[in-house]
Image (cartoon, rainbow, N blue to C red):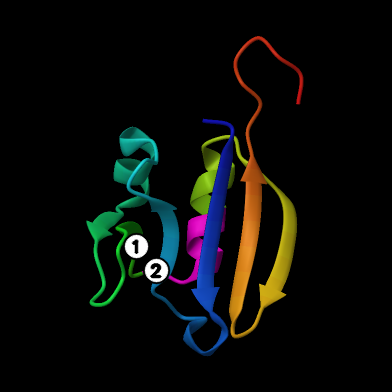
Amino acid sequence: MPYILVSTSIRLENGPTNVGDEHSDKDIMEKLGAKLVQHKGNPFKEYTVPDPPRIVLDRLEELGYTVVNACGIGQTIVWTLYKPLPGTTG
């Protein structure tokens, strides 16, 4: 999986941080310490860690991911990260 979206609410910059959906790579989610949760009222599940985004981004960099974009959407900030697949050049 070469892309990961990381997000948090701007007012929660100290965590928690959303790091994936129910289809995300389970090994990566385990390395991040993420738990799969379903918030009341949402028809989907997502992986969440209690850590602030900076810690999550540092961990993903250690796993070979690079931030390629960041943007604000309403009260949410989203980072897009990319990791080249083995045998390819990013």
Secondary structure at badge 2 equals loop
Quadrant for the C terminus, please. top right
**Magenta residues (range):** 51-57
Which residue is located at x 52 percent, y 37 percent?
Answer: 63
**Does 52 appear above or below 6?**
below
Does the CB distance between marks 2 and 1 fall below 8 Å?
A: no
Please state if 71 lies on the left or on the right of 45 as rendered.
right
Residue 73 position by quadrant: bottom right
Q: Which residue is mark 1?
A: 48
Residue farthest toward the top in the current orientation of the protein: 87
Which circle marks residue 39 in the picture?
Answer: none
The amino acid marked with disc number 1 is Thr
Q: Give the distance between the C-alpha atoms of the residues marked 2 and 1, in whole angstroms.
A: 9 Å
Front one among 53 and 24: 24
Overall secondary structure of the magenta stretch? helix
Question: Label 2, on which residue?
Answer: 51
**Is 13 left, or right, of 50 in this rendering?**
right
* 78, 56: nearer the viewer: 78
SS type, badge 1: strand
Rendered location of residue 20, percent (x, y)? 43, 52
Left or right: 79, with 50 as reference point: right
Neighbor class of circle 1 (other Cα within 10 Å; few <14, some 14-19, many 20+) is: many
